Amino acid sequence: MRTKIPELSREKETLILNAAQTRFAQYGPGKVTMDEIAADIGMGKASLYYYFQTKEKLFEEVVRQEKNQFFDDMHAMMEKKVSSSDMLRRYASKRIEHFRNLANLRALVSQQHGDLKACSLELYKEFQKEEVKVLHEILLLGKKRGEFGITNLQQSAEAIMQMLYGPRSWYLHKLQRNLDDETFGLLEQSTKDIVEIILHGIRKRK
C-alpha cells in the first residue's frame, strides 16, 4: 500500500504523475527509469521515492489515473438523455477513442517487462471488472425502458465486453498492425459493426 501523502504535497504528486504519464506513453514503461522522471521535473531521485517507492507503483498510479478518467467520461456519457442503444454505441466508440489517446492503458495489453507484467495483469483485470459493471448498467437501463429483451444481465455484459475486445486483438495481435490512423479507422468500423450485431440480438421484439 502506498504511503498516504500529506495534502500540501499533492501538487508535487500530480507533477510526478503527469511527467511519468508523458514519459511512459512515449517510451513504454519498460524503458523508463526513475532517474529520468526525476530529471524531467527537477526533483532528486530520493524525493521521488518518497512519493512512489518503485517504478511499478508509479506506473500503477498513472494507469489508475487514466482508468479513472476513462470511467468518469463513461458515466458522464450515460447521464445524457439518449436511448440505451445509442448509449451502447457511444460507449463502444469512446472505448476506441480512449484506447488511442491513453497510451498507458494500452500498455496493459502488451506489457511484458518483469515485475511490470504482474502489475499490469492485476490492473487489466481491475479495468475489465469495472467495464463489465458499466455495461451491466447500460443493459439494466435498457431492460427497464423496455428496449432490451435480456434475461441474464451479468452474463450478457461479460459477453459484450469480450466481443468489444475482439477487433483490437484481431488487428494488433493477429495481424500485427501498427497503431496508425488506418488501423484505428479499421478498429472503429469493426467495433461499430459488432455493436449493431449485438443490438440486433438484444433488442426486445415487438
Image: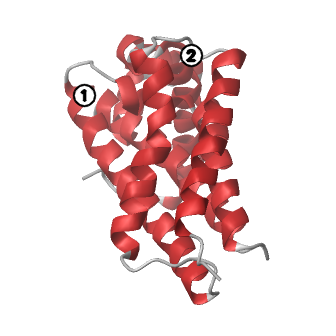
Question: What colouring does the structure picture have?
Answer: secondary structure
Q: Between 32 and 72, which is closer to the camera in this rendering?
A: 72
Q: Check disc 2 and report the residue beneath it.
A: 26
Asked which quadrant contains residue 32, the reply is top left
- Can the viewer see residue 5? no
Q: Between 57 and 154, which is closer to the camera in this rendering?
A: 154
Q: SS class of the residue under badge 1? A: helix
Can you name the residue that lies furthest to the right here?
81
Could you say where residue 189 lies in the image, as x and y percent from the top left? 68, 34
Residue 87, label in figure: none
Q: Residues within 10 Å of mark 2 (few under 14, many from 20)?
A: few
Q: Residue 76 vs residue 139: left or right?
A: right
Q: Check disc 1 and report the residue beneath it.
A: 117
Q: SS class of the residue under badge 2? A: helix
Q: Residue 11 vs residue 58: left or right?
A: right
2 and 1 marks in contact (CB < 8 Å):
no
- Can the viewer see residue 78? yes
Asked which quadrant contains residue 75, the reply is bottom right
Asked which quadrant contains residue 40, the reply is top right
Q: Residues within 10 Å of mark 1 (few under 14, many from 20)?
A: some
> The disc labelled 1 sits on which kind of residue?
Lys
Q: Quadrant of the C terminus?
A: bottom right
Could you say where residue 136 lies in the image, as x and y percent from the top left? 46, 71
Could you say where residue 50 lies in the image, as x and y percent from the top left? 35, 38
Residue in the picture at 56% in, 71% down: 138
Could you say where residue 176 lies in the image, as x and y percent from the top left? 45, 11
Residue in the picture at 60% in, 40% down: 191
Q: Between 7 and 122, which is closer to the camera in this rendering?
A: 122
> The disc labelled 2 sits on which kind of residue?
Gln
Residue in the picture at 35% in, 16% down: 30
**Lower sequence index among marks 2 and 1:** 2
Q: Residue 76 vs residue 135: left or right?
A: right
